[in-house]
Amino acid sequence: METTLLKPVMSSEELAELNRLTAEHNARINSGRNSQQSLGKDDFLKLLLTQLANQDPTAPLEDKEFIAQMAQFSSLEQMNNMAADFAKMARMLQVTEASSALGKSVEILEGDNVIQGAVKAVSRDASPQVLVNGVNYNWDQVIRVYQGESGL
């Protein structure tokens, strides 16, 4: 009887990388870190492609497992899209809030100083600025808004 040697399914380097990514992913899940520090969609795709490319041909990935992994990837993609949409909405709300201060008196905290004046202009950039006393200040520096110029 002839003995046939089976070729390894993945090289030791590929196995080490797969183990490293899996350990990193599990450690991040178990540590409760926020989503900014967890594996992203690119890491998930790399892990999935490595798994598919190096699977044992005699025991391929089950349909159910593959569908579950694709559903996880789809969920990850949707969460990323929602996070981007929420960030865009937060920027729009900040611009709207800054625009509503146009013509009103404000107090601005710059270092240890409080600057008072009326808002003469508002920029609609991603980080809105207000023009007070001839100087542009970030909207984040505004600590108080008064109705009209008589609030000072």
Image (spheres, rainbow, N blue to C red):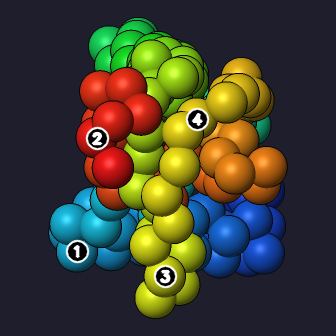
Q: Earlier in the sequence, mark 3 or mark 2?
A: 3
Q: Earlier in the sequence, mark 2 or mark 1?
A: 1
Disc on the earlier residue, 4 or 3: 3
Q: Residues within 10 Å of mark 4 (few under 14, many from 20)?
A: many
Instruction: Name which residue lies at 33% across and 36% down.
Output: 150
Rendered image: mark on residue 31: 1
Query: Answer yes or no: do the residues labelled 4 and 3 have beta carbons within 8 Å?
Result: no
In this rendering, does residue 113 appear at all? yes
Q: CA distance from mark 4 to mark 2?
A: 13 Å
Q: Name the residue type under label 1.
A: Ser
**Residue type at mark 3?**
Asn
**Residue 77 versus residue 13 in the image, above or below:** above
Please rate how many residues cluster around mark 2, counting C-alpha atoms within 10 Å: few if below 14, some from 14 to 19, many from 20: few
Q: Which mark is residue 113?
A: 3
- Which quadrant of the structure image shows residue 3? bottom right
Q: Amino acid at mark 4?
A: Val
